[in-house]
Image (cartoon, rainbow, N blue to C red):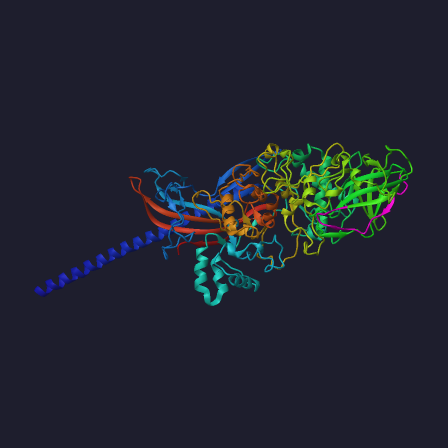
Amino acid sequence: MGSALIITLMLLVLLTTIILASLVKAQSSRQSSSSIMGNFSANQFAQDGVNQGIALLQYATGQTDARWISQPGRIEKLIASGTSVTSELIDLHSGLAATPADGVNLNAAMLQNPSEGVIAYDPSIKMPLSWIYIRENGVRTANATYDAANKVVGRYAFWTDDNTARVNVNTAWSADPAINIVNSQAHPSRIPLTGAFPTMTPDDVKSIRDFRAGGNFFNTPQDISKAFGNNFASYSTLARESKFWTTNVNASPDAQLTSFGLPKIVLTTKPARAKAKDGTQLPYINVSTSAAIDTTKATLRNYLSRADWGEGLEGSLQAKYYSNNSGLLDQLALNIMEYVRCRESADDVIKPMRHGVGSSGKIFAGATRRFRMVEIGFWRSSTNPSNGRIYFVLTLPRNAGLQSYTMSSWRGMVVTAGNVAEQDIWLPNTTLDAGRYVLLSRPLITPIPNTGAVYARHFRLYRNGLADMFDVYPSGQGAYVELYDFPVTVSAPSSGDPSMPADETLIQTIKVTDPFLGGTKDDWSAPGPNRFADLTDAAKMRAHIGLGVPPSNYQLGQDLDVNGNITDEGTVLPAPAGSPGNLTGYVESLAELGRVHTGISTVPGTPSVPWRTLRLQPRHPQASAHLASVPDWIILDAFALPNIPANETNALLERMNGKGGLVNLNSALKPFSTVERPQALKSLLGVSTQFTEAQKTTAASSIIQQTLANTTIAKGKMAGSGLIQYPGNIVEFAGISDEGEASEARLSGILDLATTRGSIFTIYSVGQRVIQTSTGKLIPKGEASQLSMVERYEDAGAVKFRVILNKPLRY
C-alpha cells in the first residue's frame, strides 16, 4: 500500500511537471510570437515613413515641367503665374520634437557600438523627430490622446536627406590641375576628396583615384577602405567617421533647360560641342553666317529681356541697365558672343563682328581681342595749309588677352574725308605692350585752307587689304556713322620740320577713357588738351581714365576694387586658344561671363558706362537702384558649358536624367537648426585655390546660415522664401565674392559644380509597434529602422521614383 501511494505521488508530480512545462512553453511561444509580430509591425510602420517620404517627393516634383528646389529635409515648389512666381514649402520629415523624450532621436547610438550614432558618427549630435501615430483604424495623426475605441497601435518618424548635400566618393578627386590634368575645372572630379577626409594625404587620395580608375566603384562610402589594402582597418574607421557627409551616389536633374523652360545656350561656336545626351543639337553661339548671327543675337536678346526668373527675382537686365532699349541689348549680346569667339580662336587679334540692327541700320561692333584707339586730333600748319598731321594714341588694354603686339603691316585710312588728300598712310612698326599707351602721328596733306573744314568721320586701321579691318573711331561704318569731326589745331610749324608743329602740347584732341568704348560720339570728350606728355606715366594715365577713385554715381554699377575704387580688373578677354593663358581654347566656367562688358553703347544719345562688366558680386550698398533690381548673376541660368570629353568615366556621373557629383548650396539640415554639415560646401569651395582653409570654413557657414554680405562695398540680397534658387545666388553671401571685382575669380569652377536641387534622396525612418494603456502611456513592443535611397527620374514623359537601396539600421 505504501509503495502504491509513492507511485501515485510520483505520477502526479510527473504529470504536474509536464503540465507546467507545457504552460511555460506556451507562454514562451506566445511571447516569441508576440515579439515576432511586434518586429514585423514595427518594420511595416518604418516602411510607412519611407512611403510618406516618397509621396511628398512625388507631390513636390512629380511634374516634368515642375520648378523646385531641394535641401535636406525640405523642398520648395515654385509656381509660375505670368512673370511672377510664388512658392510652397514642403517638409520632408515628420516634424521637429522639442526634445528626444518627446519623440525619437534619429541619431541614436548603434546597438553594436554605443559610441557611434546611426546617422552621424558622433552620437552627441541629436536629431529629435516627432512621432506620427497610427491608430487601430489605420488613421495617421500627430495626436496620441487615449481613445478606448481607437487606440494607438504604432508610430513612426522619418527624415529625408538630399544626397547632393554630401561629397560623392565615386566622383570627387583633386582640384589641383597639375594632378587632375585632363578634366576641366567644371568636372565633378575637381571637387577635392580632402574636403570630406581632411586627414587624407595626397597618396591616400591617389589610392582612391587609382582604385576607381581600375574600373571599381564604391557601393557605400565605407567601401573606400577597399582602396587601401593592408590599411583596411584604419580607413574603415575614417569612412565611418565621415558617413554623415559622404555618399556613393548623388545626382542633380540635368539642367538643359532654363528656369522658364527654354533650352540653355551652350557657350561654344562649335556645334559638335553643343549636343544633348541623345544627340539633339542644342542652341549655341552660332556665328557661321549673317543669318546665324541674327538668330543667336535674337535668342540672347530674348533671355536678357526676360522678367520671370523666379520668386523675388522679377525684372530684366534690359530694364535694369538699358531703360528697355533693345538696341543696347544687341550690343551686350554681341559682347557675349565675342567673348566665346575669342576663347575659341587662335588668332592674335580678332576683327569684331559688325551687324546691323533695327530700322536705323545702326552697326554694332562686339568687344574683341585687339588694340584700341583712345585719342585723336589733327594739326594744320598756320603758314602752309597744305601741311598737316594726324595724331592718335593706341593702347593694348592690359586685360585684352595679349601681353604685347607688333603693328607690322598695318595701315591707316581716314574714312569719308573728301577734303583730305592723303587718306591712306603707313603706320610705324610699333610694339604695343599691354596696359601701355603709344602716340603715333603721320603726315596728311590738306589742300583746303579752312580752319573749320570737315576733315573726317572716323579712322580705320587695316592689314591684308581690308580683310582685317578695324573702324576705331567711332566703331560704326557706312551711311549710318555718326558725324563727329576730329578737332583741328592750327599752329606754327617746327622750324626744323615744316610737317611737324612747333609745339605739340597745343594739339587739341578728343579722348575716351575706357579703351573698350568709343562706338558712339558720346563716349568721346569735347576737344581739349592732349595727354601726350603723360602716356608713359602709369599713375597719371590711371587718373586720366578714371581708375583708382570712387565712382561719381553708384547707380551705374561700375567695377570696384576692394577699396571701393573704380578698377579695370573685370574687363578681360581670353588669350589666343592654345597659348599659356588659354590652353584649352573653350569656356571652362560660367564665371567667365563676369568679364563681359555691359556698359558699351553704340546708340546715339546714350553714352557708354566705362569699366562695367556683368556683376558676380553683391551690389554696392549705395547703389539703391541695383539693390531693387534683378541681379546680374541671374543671366548665368541661360547658359550651359560646352560638352568636352573628360578623362573620367561618365558612368559614375550620369544618373538617369541627371548629373552626379555636384554639391547643393542648400545644405542646411531642416528641421535641425542646431546641426550643421559644412563638409560638402567646404569641398565645393576647395575647387578654387583662392580660399584658405579658414575662409572656406567661414564661407560655408555663411551659406548654411544665409549670412549675407554686408561691407562698405557689398550688400547681399536674398530672394524668395529661404532656399537658394540658383547657383549664382552664392555671390550674395559673406566671404564669397564680396571683396571687389578681383574676388569674382574665386567663382571659377565653383559656380559650375554647384546645384540647388538633387534627384537622389535618402529616407531614414524609425517605426515602433506600441501598446497604449488606459492612462495613455505607450509601451514599445517592437522597433525597426530603415534607410532607403530613392532616385527621381523622368521616363517617357513621366516622373518616376525607384528605390536603389533599402537596408535596416543599427544592425
Q: Nearer the viewer, residue 566 or 451?
A: 451
Q: Nearer the viewer, residue 506 or 177?
A: 506
Quadrant of the image containing the N terminus: bottom left
- Say whether residue 14 is left or right of residue 307: left
Task: Using the rendered view, name the quadrant where residue 412 is placed.
Answer: top right
Task: Using the rendered view, name the quadrant where residue 180 is placed.
Answer: bottom right
Q: Nearer the viewer, residue 18 or 538?
A: 538
- Say whether residue 250 is left or right of residue 671: right
Q: Is residue 267 visible?
A: yes
Q: Is residue 299 visible?
A: no
Total marks shown come to 0
- Say whether residue 570 is left or right of residue 518: left
Magenta span covers which residues?
420-438
Q: Nearer the viewer, residue 729 or 394?
A: 394
Q: Position of residue 582 (x, y in %)?
A: 68, 54
Q: Position of residue 697 (x, y in %)?
A: 49, 49
Quadrant of the image containing the C terminus: bottom left
Q: Position of residue 363 (x, y in %)?
A: 79, 39
Question: Furthest residue to the front?
Answer: 495
**Magenta span includes 587:** no
- Say whether residue 129 is left or right of residue 79: left
Question: Furthest residue to the bottom?
Answer: 230
Q: Is residue 488 above or below residue 100?
A: above
Q: Is residue 582 above or below residue 774?
A: below
Q: Is residue 222 above or below residue 722?
A: below
**Magenta span includes 436:** yes
Q: Position of residue 518 (x, y in %)?
A: 75, 39
Residue found 46% across the figure and 61% down from its top: 235
